[in-house]
Image (cartoon, rainbow, N blue to C red):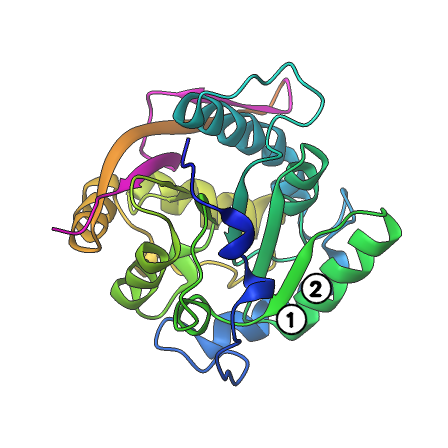
């Protein structure tokens, strides 16, 4: 585990960079508008974000396992993540931030949608959880020289306008050797049929237009971008949905949903 003084590196102890609520190369204004329109539904398990509620237990299990292995944590303790500072980029309504905070992590959630941050903050306050939420982009936060033990980018990379800028900012935000944990959708015919035709048009799990198939990334493409940003991919897993059991599980099938983690390499 990194033995550096995290309290000296936390967001509260750094001067804040100027920001303009989403004025960064990676931010797609149309994507932000789409999520602004759905923001009120973040915490409704049967609402517009039902797919994320369904997949969240699997994502959280993967995050916890990855962090436990990377930092040699004892996950049987009450708050095993108490020494970690975690950044959730594109946090939405806080579906991942809150469970990690309950495990003791010092969590900062950021999002280019001001309404998302308002919803997330209100829910955390209602749940009596100390989660720090900010209406700011990854690039703008990186300008303030913040560093975190781990950075999360879950269902985010398929929505950004400039992937290189986004991943470079993530690289600046995680400590050397620290993990970036990501999840996204592959650009395959199967993904088009499943994630767009099936989820948006047939099952209507998501509003039409939530995803643009052209912005999906094959694992090899994302790995190449990550290497350019200074990361080394350490793991890739598929996420498969069983409609009969109504549950998601890890698999070796990377053709639709997948997740993984990459470590930021030390600067030469």
Q: Nearer the viewer, residue 208 or 217?
A: 217
Query: Residue 113's spot in the image, x, y percent?
Result: 60, 71
Residue occupying the point 28% across, 43% down:
188
Magenta stretch contains residue 65: no
The magenta stretch is 245-268
Query: Residue 202's spot in the image, x, y percent?
Result: 57, 46
User: Does residue 128 appear to the left or right of 210 in the view shown?
Assistant: right
Mark 1 and 2 residues: CB-CB less than 8 Å, in contact? Answer: yes
Residue at the limit of the structure toward the top, as seen here = 76
Which residue position holds label 2? 39
Residue occupying the point 44% across, 43% down:
150
- The residue carrying pointer 2 sits among few (fewer than 14), some (14 to 19) or many (20 or more) residues within 10 Å by Cα, namely many
Residue occupying the point 59% across, 55% down:
108
Q: Nearer the viewer, residue 17 or 233?
A: 17
- In the picture, which quadrant includes the N terminus? top left
Identify whether 8 is placed above or below 22: above
Residue occupying the point 53% across, 76% down:
16
User: Does residue 33 appear to the left or right of 101 in the view shown?
Assistant: left
Q: Quadrant of residue 118?
A: bottom right
For mark 2, give the secondary structure: helix
Q: CA distance from mark 1 to mark 2?
A: 5 Å
Identify whether 85 is placed above or below 257: below
Q: Nearer the viewer, residue 228 or 132?
A: 132
For mark 1, give the secondary structure: helix
Which residue position holds label 1? 36
- The residue carrying pointer 1 sits among few (fewer than 14), some (14 to 19) or many (20 or more) residues within 10 Å by Cα, namely some
Query: Residue 164's spot in the image, x, y percent?
Result: 25, 64
Query: Residue 94's spot in the image, x, y percent?
Result: 67, 51
């Amino acid at each position: 585990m990194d033995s550096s003084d995290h309290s000296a590196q936390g967001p509260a102890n750094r001067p804040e960079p100027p920001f303009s609520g989403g004025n960064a190369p990676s931010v797609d204004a149309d994507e932000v508008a789409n999520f602004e329109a759905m923001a009120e539904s973040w915490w409704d398990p049967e609402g517009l974000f039902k797919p994320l509620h369904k997949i969240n237990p699997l994502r959280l299990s993967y995050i916890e396992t990855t962090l436990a292995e990377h930092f040699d944590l004892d996950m049987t303790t009450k708050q095993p993540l108490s020494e970690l500072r975690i950044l959730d980029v594109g946090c939405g309504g806080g579906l991942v931030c809150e469970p990690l905070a309950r495990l003791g992590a010092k969590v900062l959630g950021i999002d280019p949608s001001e309404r998302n941050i308002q919803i997330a903050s209100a829910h955390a306050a209602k749940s009596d959880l100390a989660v720090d939420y900010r209406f700011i982009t990854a690039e703008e936060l990186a300008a303030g020289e913040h560093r975190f033990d781990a950075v999360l980018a879950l269902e985010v990379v398929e929505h950004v306008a400039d992937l290189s800028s986004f991943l470079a900012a993530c690289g600046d935000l995680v400590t050397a050797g620290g993990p970036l944990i990501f999840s996204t959708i592959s650009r395959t015919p199967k993904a088009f049929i499943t994630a767009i035709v099936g989820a948006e048009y047939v099952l209507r799990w998501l509003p039409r237009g939530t995803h643009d198939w052209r912005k999906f990334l094959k694992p090899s493409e994302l790995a190449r971008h990550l290497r350019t940003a200074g990361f080394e991919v350490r793991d890739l897993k598929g996420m498969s949905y069983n409609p009969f059991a109504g549950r998601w599980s890890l698999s070796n099938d990377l053709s639709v949903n997948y997740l993984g983690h990459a470590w930021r390499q030390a600067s030469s």
